[in-house]
Amino acid sequence: MNDLFAELKRRNVIKVVTAYLIASWITLQMADVVREPFGMPDWVFQSILITLGIGFVLTVALAWIFKFTPEGIKRTSAAGDFAAEGFSTGRKIDFVIIALLAIALIGYVTKDTLFDPQQEAVDADAVKSIAVLPFVSMSSDVENEYFSDGLSEELLNMLANIKDLKVAGRTSSFYYKGRDIDLREIGSQLNVNHVLEGSVRKSGNQVRITAQLISVADGYHLWSEVYDRQLDDIFKIQEEIARAVTAALKVTLLGEEDQALAMEQELNPEAHSMYLIARSRQRERGKDNLLQAMQFFEKIIEDFPDFSPAYSGLSDSILLLSNNHFYMTFEEAREMATPHIEKALQLAPLSSDAWASKGFLDQEIFENNGDSEYLASAEAAYLKAHDLDPKNAQALYWYGILMDDIGNYKAAIELFNQSLELDPLARIPRYRLALDYQQLGDFDEAREALAESARLYPDFPTPRLALANLELSIGNF
């Protein structure tokens, strides 16, 4: 036995095996660390283990048979003392072992912080983020459904004004309306770690609102509440929900943010309900919806002439009817919309939405008349809207279209990407983004954006038509 041990030492088998075992341990630790974050199947880890086992046998055999010398790899002599090259080889292996031990020690110390899911969760939680899913209407009345949608959007806008809270855009949140999708998938798609969901039942002047804040990581309810109130209390309910959410997420409100949540509303509850319905109808597009939105906005203005959002909402509805639905000529729309925009800005000169509507009007004038004065005015309005509210995805999207109008596709791509970062599932910005990539000859990016748009919106035929045109343009008949 002593002779065998001496021979193993002479041939450096013990040192080689030691180095191999340390290297194998490091390999297994690294594989274990990255297995969960990268979704590594169990069979991959098992294959690594089997390969290392086979490698161990081969390493022992090769170490017994061969030795490293200054002249290269040679067969080990059957017997003898340590030769000079053997001693040199042994020293080199010692250095390798020391280096591997240092790596193993570093890996052991830092393992818990590398790719650790819990650590990632802590890091993600440091950036508070939320998606406000559309509250479910518990009434069969269509108007109550619009009211419910509007209430959800109102809460979204209130939370979006909080600096330290990342809020997914309206289009992305409303993508999930009526869809049964796992919360973890929603969190992944929107890059948020919480969702706010609930329901609304409205009957006459009575309203019942349930709300619950949920962690997408584990489905745990951080907060929930049921409000049985009079419709007159709707503003108070919205404020209470917003404050409860920020408290549950441990978001500190700045002074101006705290004041904004507590501001007295400019509308009575009935008019506010009308405004929520009008805005939801406008979002739905279509001639009938836009016409009804116009009627609601006009009624609000008649009863509450100092309510700025109704003026910008009315202007947008008019321009959309002219632009997309050809209900009136553009000159008619321009004549109708201009005084409403001016009034909106007069009443609320620091409203990002009002400035975005101003940019939309000037952009439409430029597109129809080619007047460069309105190009500059539209760009200035969009920049003002963005300066007042960097989270205004609509302003960025419209600004991107303006850049398309003048052929500045690189700027348009940047703006559409910024808009999608705020509102990841917005349908039209992604489609426009693909067209810009195609204009610049980046067909792979264009194809990817169109395919993603078609996947997200299977009932939206335009991306498939654009994909066909893309393949046709590059000869893939």
Image (cartoon, rainbow, N blue to C red):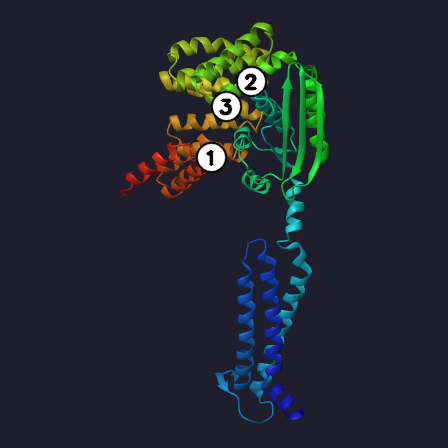
Residue at horizontal 57%, vertical 33%?
168
Q: Residue 373, position in %: x, y?
A: 42, 17
The residue sitting at the front extreme is: 140
Q: Secondary structure at mark 1?
A: helix
Q: On residue 143, which mark appears?
A: 2
Along the line of sight, the residue nearer the viewer: 453 or 430? 453
Q: Residue 120, position in %: x, y?
A: 64, 48
Along the line of sight, the residue nearer the viewer: 32 or 331? 32
Mark toward the start of the polypeptide (2 vs 3):
2
Which residue has dot 3 on it? 382
Q: Residue 82, position in %: x, y?
A: 60, 89
Q: Residue 179, position in %: x, y?
A: 53, 34
Q: What amino acid does circle 3 point to?
A: Tyr
Asked if residue 265 is positioned above or below residue 469 in the image, the reply reads above
Q: Write down the quadrant of residue 34 in the picture.
A: bottom right
Mark toward the start of the polypeptide (1 vs 2):
2
Q: Secondary structure at mark 2?
A: helix
Q: Marks 2/3: CA distance?
A: 33 Å
